[in-house]
Image: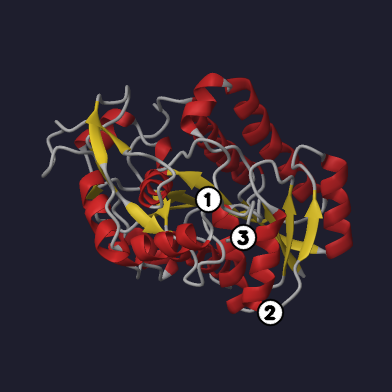
Amino acid sequence: MKILITGGAGYIGSHTLIELSNAGYKFVVFDNLSNSSKKSIKRVEKIIKTPIFFEEGDVRDKKALNKVFKKYKIDSVIHFAGLKSVGESVQNPLEYYDNNIVGTLKLLEVMKKNNCKKLVFSSSATVYNEVDAQNYTPLKENFPTGVTTNPYGRTKYFIEEILKDLYLSDPKFKIAILRYFNPVGAHESGTIGEDPNGIPNNLMPYISQTAVGKREFLSVFGGDYPTHDGTGVRDYIHVVDLADAHVKALNYLNSKNKQTTNPLIVNIGTGVGYSVIDMIKAFEKVSGKKVPYKIVQRRLGDISTCYSDSSYAKEVLNWESKKTIDDMCADSWKWQNNNPNGYTKKK
């Protein structure tokens, strides 16, 4: 029996393959390569020293999905596949609703048809209500959700609601929803990492691209927030710790204990907030490179502080983050320095 990893060639997916392999799990990667590279799969194969079953396809294609379920006897699914840029989702909402929500519905239909009822879903802290995030940090899993500022966050919220309804209709489903905070870092080998198409969505690629000379300076949005240095504070989580959370979630679904709550909803963060300036300073320390920056106007909709309460993940999954801010920056720098153009060209 194998696990289907949708979007497994992407940033978080590729790192999760390594952790799954280390834990002895067998898997198949299903990815349309719209925002990822098959080179990441090749590099993971070198790290785990095992060939990976890879099928190119789109989760909205039920015929292709059905073939994969039949061919590999899929037992459970980790669902990463989806578009993930907040800014782009505001420009192209229909594309995001189609890709993320319709894609998930098709996947669930095929899972049900093939009697596959274990799912780990890649959700996001963007599902939390913006006002509550501002006033009630650290965020707990039972805080209000749904009042999000962008279509990307809404797709994650709607999918969470769909999964709750699915469970009510069929309690044989075992579902874990992981709400990520801000994934950063790369594998310690420096051979796989974040390789965004075009404009990055996250802070770390901007910092590392500035350090490597691809950008003249880093724009820091807002320097007058009520934080210790005036810049926005967020919960950054090392991608390898995040990948490990998926293994722990799968272990939980596979355990003989009956789920006390379904779907299981868990924050995946460090529980610590770092400011933009904190991240820049840590990066400069580990890389020995200067990261020039300019404070510019705040972005619409940004809040000053947002970080997780991650104690529930420790309680139910026996998971907690292990890697430090220095680890996050050092591994990001190693990846960027070894691969200044991502997967497109080896240095």
The disc at residue 346 is 3
| 139, 97: nearer the viewer | 97
Judge whether 140 appears above or below 16 on screen.
above
Image quarter in which the N terminus is found:
bottom right
Q: Residue at x 62, y 75 (%)?
A: 47
Crowding around mark 1 (Cα neighbors within 10 Å: few <14, some 14 to 19, many 20+) is: many
Mark 2–mark 3 contact, CB under 8 Å? no
Judge from the rendering whether residue 225 lies leftward or rightward of residue 162; answer left or right: left
Q: State the residue position of label 1.
A: 263
Image quarter of residue 131: top left
The residues tagged by marks 1 and 3 sit, at their Cα atoms, a distance apart of 42 Å
Q: Earlier in the sequence, mark 1 or mark 2?
A: 2
Q: Quick one: label 1 or label 3, which is nearer the N terminus?
A: 1
Mark 1 touching mark 2, by CB under 8 A? no
User: As shown in the figure, which amino acid type bears the numbered disc 2?
Assistant: Lys
Q: Is residue 25 visible?
A: no
